[in-house]
Image (cartoon, rainbow, N blue to C red):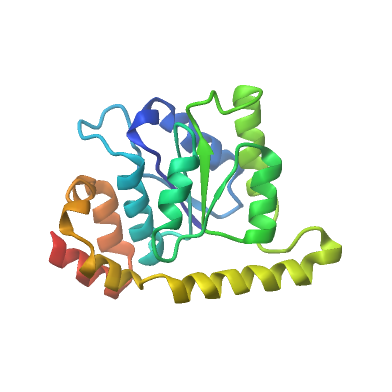
Amino acid sequence: MKIGVIQASSQAGKNSYIFETVRRFAPGGSEVINFGCTLEESNKYSYVDISILIGLLLESEAVDFVVTGCSSGQGMMLACNSMPGVLCGYAPTPKDAYLFAQINNGNCISLPLGEEYTWAGEENFEKTIELLFSEPFGQGYPKSEADRKLKDTERLKAIRATAQLRSEDFLKLAEQVYFENCLKKEDVIRYVLKNGNETIKTILKGML
């Protein structure tokens, strides 16, 4: 599994800690890539900017999963779920992270990084990441209801795919001003151009 770590600039001071925690609990054999935002970056990125970059990373298939967040975690979750192909959960607690992974089987998780990682601080945050990756995704929960839960998840994904624009259409139709700041995030752009699929790479090159 390729796991990207990227959060809004408002929480740049916590980036290294988030990255190291994800690396500690990521499934064996996973590659964890840190895309910031860090304190050393001069340009600042809002949760909306980051959600667009997350959409590029996931829809280009450059990464399989993204750990992200902003001050509350809510704004990032909503913004990410507006992006084609992104199914983002909100996980203020370990139990939320576990249930999201097992029932919703999404590809992105948003964390409340400005609330001292919510109750119990760093202990809660680390347990949240640990439980997120504690088992293979998409097994259903509770086990007695697993089949029904997984069928509902697949229905939801199918409905979202029908209701949303395809990524290539979104990138072509959305006003380019939305992307101006995002395109300055050179580490993400380079990674997508190197590791992404040809469809997104071609569109992205046309935007640069």
In this view, which residue lies farthest toward the right?
A: 144
| Residue 81 shows in the view | yes
Direction from residue 151 to residue 45 in the image, left or right: left
Q: Indicate whether 74 appears above or below 80.
A: above
Q: Indicate whether 111 appears above or below 162.
A: above
Q: Residue at x 47, y 27 (%)?
A: 114
Residue 59: image location, x then y, percent: 38, 66
When asked about the image quadrant of residue 91, the answer is top right
Direction from residue 107 to residue 98 in the image, left or right: right
Residue 50: image location, x then y, percent: 34, 46
Residue 115: image location, x then y, percent: 53, 25
Q: Residue at x 51, y 59 (%)?
A: 87
In this view, which residue lies farthest toward the front?
A: 163
Residue 92: image location, x then y, percent: 61, 37
Direction from residue 90 to residue 189 in the image, left or right: left
Q: How many marks?
A: 0
Q: Residue at x 36, y 71 (%)?
A: 165
| Residue 136 shows in the view | no
Q: Residue at x 69, y 48 (%)?
A: 98
Q: Quadrant of the C terminus?
A: bottom left
Direction from residue 37 to residue 127 in the image, left or right: right
